[in-house]
Amino acid sequence: MKSMRSFIGLVMILSLLAVSPVQAQDDDHNKYFDQTRHNIQGAFWHFYQNINEAETFLGYPITEQFINQDGVLVQYFQRARLELQNGEVHLSPLGTLTYKTGVQLRIDNPLACRDFETGDAVCFAFLQYFDEHGGLALLGYPISPFEYQDNRVVQYFQNGRLEWHPSKPEGQRVVMGELGAIFFNSTGEDPARRDPVLPLDPSIRTQVLSLKVRAFPWKAVTYSTDQQLIFVVVQDQTFQPVQGAIGQAKVIWTTGEEKTLPVLIDENGIATLPLTIANQAYGGLVTIDVQVSLGEQSGQTTTSFRIWY
């Protein structure tokens, strides 16, 4: 019996340690996230590593750490903000700071809900998510009931907002709202802090994780015999220009005939494709299908222009 009590006590202590504020660490450990092209370092990185499913709970960093207008060391993430106060890392109370009342949905189900001293209850899948992601120590107390906002069921907590996404797969339908990005945009901080940066570790090479491809014609309408330019723009996951992507553009003329042009993206993330138009049908539509790739990443888009006369 004594050994059982000792075991239970140990489990309780470990549970508390898992969600307690993390002490600032005087080290240079860091990680670079290509998804947003920002670093996490020191105490913030140590805190991040100790969060269950941090990449979905906090999201990726959208700034570097910096001293904000209140003189506090902070770092913004997609879904949260971390701050260093008195040597400890905490989640900022973004739920409290951003809460606006929506259409309230009252639920009375004692078997599926847990009441809190704020007068609000957490229920169903929100309660499961709450328990699995630090509970009071991370999300804080609920400060609203279920509410209907922007065509979605949500619930606010002191440090965040939970959202219900029924179209997502089972087990992924409760999502932390992107209050970090929302609050950053409302604070008056320098927007340039969100600009991508290089890794703190110079040995790390940045990676292109996705290609965003756009194309558009120089002239939306041309003569049946004319000159035209097609511009192809390729950017990465952070909307930075991608150099060296290659591919092809398939031009489908008004007659149904096809012409293929090579695409080579320059250092500015742009390719310019000249087209000679000859004897096309009046009022017809010329379509250009563009496909480009870089390593394992690929992207495609379509544009068009109209033949006038």
Image (cartoon, grey):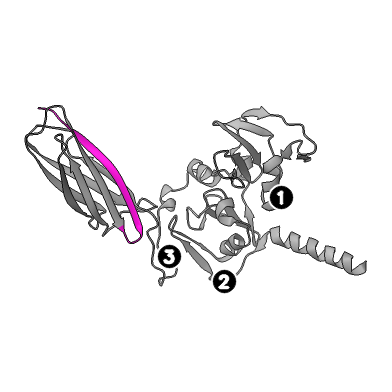
What's the amino acid at mark 2?
A: Asp
The majority secondary structure of the magenta stretch comes to: strand
Q: Nearer the viewer, mark 3 or mark 2?
A: 3
The span from disc 3 to disc 2 (Cα, nearest Å) is 17 Å
Q: Residue at x 13, y 46 (%)?
A: 274
In the image: residue 12, left or right of residue 148: right
The span from disc 3 to disc 1 (Cα, nearest Å) is 34 Å
- Residue placed under numbered mark 3 in the picture: 199
Q: Position of residue 66 (x, y in %)?
A: 50, 57
Q: Residue at x 59, y 55 (%)?
A: 83
Q: Quadrant of residue 278?
A: top left
Nearest to the observer: residue 194 or residue 223 = 223
- Residue placed under numbered mark 2 in the picture: 27
**What secondary structure is found at the residue carrying circle 3?**
loop
How crowded is the residue under tag 2: few (<14 C-alpha within 10 Å), some, or many (20+)?
A: few
Nearest to the observer: residue 98 or residue 115 = 115
In the image: residue 278, left or right of residue 177: left
What's the amino acid at mark 3?
A: Pro
**What secondary structure is found at the residue carrying circle 2?**
loop
Q: Nearer the viewer, mark 3 or mark 1?
A: 1
Give the mark nearer the N terminus: 3 vs 2.
2
Q: Position of residue 236 (x, y in %)?
A: 36, 53
Q: Quadrant of residue 21?
A: bottom right
Give the mark nearer the N terminus: 1 vs 2.
2
Q: Which mark is residue 131?
A: 1
**Which stretch did the figure color magenta?**
294-309
Task: Tell whether label 2 touches label 1 (CB within 8 Å).
Answer: no
Q: Position of residue 269 (x, y in %)?
A: 26, 53
139 to 151, vertically: above or below: below
The span from disc 1 to disc 2 (Cα, nearest Å) is 31 Å
